Image (cartoon, coloured by chain):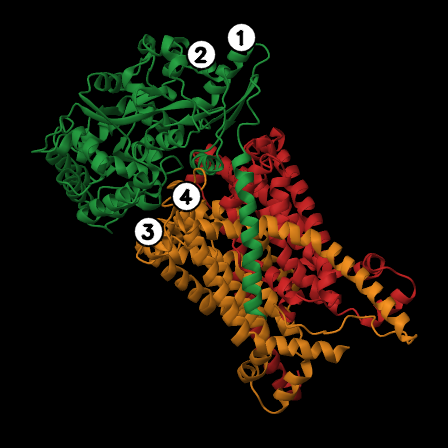
Amino acid sequence: MAVSVRKSAPGRDAASAPARHRRAARSRRRLRERATIAAFLLPALVLFAALVLLPVVFALYTSLFRWGGFGWPDEFVGLDNFVRLFQDEVFLGDLWRGFVLIALSVCVQLPFALAMAVLLNQRLRGRAFYRLLFFAPYVLSEVITGVLFTMIFAPDSGLADHIMDAVGLGGLGIGWFASSSTVLPTVFLVMTWKYFGFHMILYLAGLQSIPKDVLEAASIDGAGAWQRFRYVTLPLLGPTIRISAFLSVIGAIQLFDLIWVTTAGGPVHSSETMAVTMFQFGFKRYQVGYASAISVVMFLISFVFALFYQRYVLRRDLEGAVTSMRGRR
Amino acid sequence: MTPTTAPSSAVRLRSRLRGLSMHAIIWVVGAMIVVPLLYALVSGFKSTSELSGNPFGLPRQWVTANYTELLASGTFWRQVANSTVIALATMLVTVAVSALAAYVFARFAFRGREVVFTLFAIGLMFPFAVAILPLFILLRTFGLLDNPLGVILPQAAFGLPMTVIVLRGFFRNVPAELEEAAIIDGCSAFGFFWRILLPMARPALATVSVLAIVTSWNNFFLPLLVFTQPDWWTIPVGVQQFQGQYAQDTARILAYVVLAMAPALAFYTVAERQLIGGLTAGATKG
Amino acid sequence: MGTAPLSRRTFLAAAGLAGLSAPLLSACGGSDGSSGKTIEWWNIATTDPGKTLWPQAVKEYQAAHPGVTIKQNPMENDAYKSKMTAQTASGKLPDLFHTWGGGVLKQQVDAGLVRDITDDVKPWIGNLSPIARQAYEFDGKTYAIPYDIGMVGFWYNKAHFDKAKIDKPPATWAEFLEDVRKLKAAGITPIALGGKEKWPGHYYWAYLAIRVGGVAAVQEASKTNDFTTDPFVQAGRHLKELVDLQPFQNGFLGASYSSTDGQAAQMGNGKTAMELMGQWAPSVQRDMGEGIGDDLGFFPFPAVEGGSGAVTEVFGGGGGNAVGRDGPDIAIDFLKFFASVDNDRKRVASGGYLPIAKGAESALTDPNLRTVWETLNKATGFQQFFDQAFPPAVGQEVNDQVAALIAGKAAPEQVAQAVTQAAKGQ
């Protein structure tokens, strides 16, 4: 969704032949250009329209029907599904839990990732290895991660409970995935395990692009380590942090595989997300119209958030990117 | 030691202490990452009955059967092959189609360009889950169930937005003079694209390829719904089914989890630079 | 970005595409897969004894019928349900597929996706037990053939009962609660429950409703869609009495039925005193744990004081196979073979199933399963599992609400109301 930078196509206004000639040549060229554009764009458009837009529009359409998934939807109910949705305690709970996960991600996971990035940005033996290690969970699938952690957090017999016993905290009797009060923090723990390395890598790249002399200059001016971080590093890292926060939020809104494998949303909805609720209604209760309404709301939330973010938060970064690109040319 | 070096040794001590505490933090975090993986690896060598009594220690008796039986069974290899074929094909389709489109978006001005591009960008906001049911009906209509294309094509379609955005950013940075020169030399648009732009964009292409492979490799629901016959199951589907089937045999499941992770981790160590390089480039550029 | 022109043009383009899909959708189905000699069979036989017995039966059938291929496709229970939903929505079901009957099958039948096999099976279906057939018959028509039938009851560990000085199984709900207290006092976890999967929990609520109001009350509610009547509210209250005693194992809300330390393993490894489960319980206990051998006993769900339901009214269900709309005759022929006395004896002998064919009961050697079988045969009323008998949306709501009640998150009245709302919304 970046702003258009180049307004003119390359390769124009090259020759200075007689006007008629030029016009004919230009129109021929324009024709060829159009053909090129069409030919190059067509595969992407067809693929995208058929397999992304069409299903999504279909979901939008069915969200206006009471439809069990059999035959063609024919019982039009207008916005009833949406009205019902916003009276549904489980769905409202989904919104709240989504918010909690986002807040935890942005306020805990990202600062943690940033701290680790700052640490790994120091001259340190084995730095490359740690970077490799911390990022590794990111490449594992959520399903495999989920299966692994289900076993680790298994009540009584899992590794987590054995560790708690070993350090003398067994008496706390933390239920991990099995208790309504601890399930969300536990899920968040697994999310952090899997994703903090990803954000750390982003920050590391940002840190490495900060010119050394700026920091040195601050240091000469008598700024301490914390001041250097707070007043030089952090502002310069702004664009990276905003992108990473954006990705984190979108990821939390759409969280599904991990939850599905570990808790299936339980106990008693306490770890259910919008995507899980949607799946429950679509694939377990045969209320596809209602499920579609959930997916539409999910999309709208992501979309509005993205628009808002683009408009008010990311704009400065894009402008920066554009000017730096011009400078490079 | 002479008195003159005394202050510097104090500084050195302090910096050594700092270094130590830094290492300590990193080790703790590193342990958090490694312990679950190591636990799975070692537990795979135990019998399930030993596992409950002896969760931490090394196996009293190294049982290799969990691993060797899986490796010898053929199912596991079949799934690795399926995942590989599907990931590679997804990558090829995604990158080829996106590169063509990104080229047009980056280097041609035409009416509606931004509209179409925005449409693609909005695609980033579509969760896969939103489309899964209609997608399934569509695939069934086209007869693509139990057919690898039924997974490859939708994955490619959902991978388009990200790839197009990254590649467009890269293509844009190629100086216009180069294209002008190429055209004067008699290069067609495709010739320029194929012989000059793509080779120049190799690092960006490597990155989006690796991303496409990783995403495809980890996908779960689409292959689960599309493939009814185990012949085409991919690794995540296989792991989940395996967990259902051998629910009581924790050690065996952990062995399977380890084997399922191995290809991804191996691939990661090889392609680490492309993956990390591309992610960071994408993020710092926006 | 140009929002206004974008939204309109996109919408128009998209609307056109959506219109396109209509004829495509109606064109699907009916063209492939029914060539006759190869049939696809989807089932859930991923654990033993089914995992061994099913392929064995297929092999024997194929040997006797050269040229016929039966492609088996066993799936894990939960994955199977998801997949069947998608499949149902797409308008075509496999040639042969597992079903629990009841509301789910009814919806598929109403959508015209299941073959009516009434006339094909008329000559031989008389050999099968009527109670087993019940879940697959609607309006006098047959849509599937059972391979198993059974009922839910309490499985208990006699050694634990002895230790807690309980001399005989409880006959009433009050006695039952008293025994739970005794077990707790003796330091024994009274009940194992797989709370994560929800369906094991719904057995309690369902049985209590049946004991308070009888099977008739449930049948009535499924017609009127009103679950706020006395039996259901009472059921919730009685269940809450039990929950308040905290009778379940540590971490039961996150436990599955069949997994390491799941409900079955808890019983099978002798860690808990009781579980409320169907006829398959002993075999799963052995599969997931060590099994407790002769210590295992069975007693029917106790009567509720003042309730109009008799102890002889039972709650349960089985499993069967249905034929897809375009499934060939050979699929029905295979079902006949699969339901034959010989095959049924093999299943019964494995200890995981109860007989559905007349004459197969002689293979029933396990004394506990014999008890179950006899109780079932003397039953004065039969109610199928709620999550199968009712339409899926209602069944799932029952599971969800009862799980909330067991977790202490919903009051008995709320449960009844929410289920009613789901039923009325159908």
Q: Determine the chain carrying the residue at label 3.
A: A
Chain designation of label 1: C
| CA–CA distance in space, label 3 to label 1 | 54 Å
Callout 4: 10 Å neighbours few (<14), some, many (20+)?
Answer: few
Q: Which mark is residue A74?
A: 4
Q: Position of residue C256 (x, y in %)?
A: 37, 39
Q: Is residue B227 above or below residue A64?
A: above
Same subunit, tags 2 and 3: no
> Chain B takes which shade in the image?
red
Mark on residue C64? 1
Q: Which mark is residue C337?
A: 2
- Classify the position of the N terminus of chain A by image quarter: bottom right
Residue tagged 3: A179
Residue type beneath disc 4: Asp
* Quarter of the image where one finds residue A244: bottom right
* Marks 2 and 4, how far apart at CA: 41 Å
Q: Are marks 2 and 1 in contact (CB under 8 Å)?
A: yes
- Can residue C289 be seen from the camera position used here? no
Mark 2 or 1, nearer chain start: 1
Q: Quadrant of residue B263?
A: top right
Nearest-to-viewer mark from 2 and 3: 2
Identified by mark 1, the residue type is Ala
Q: Is residue B119 above or below residue B75?
A: below
Q: Is residue B39 left or right of residue C206?
A: right
Could you confirm whether marks 2 and 1 are on the same chain?
A: yes
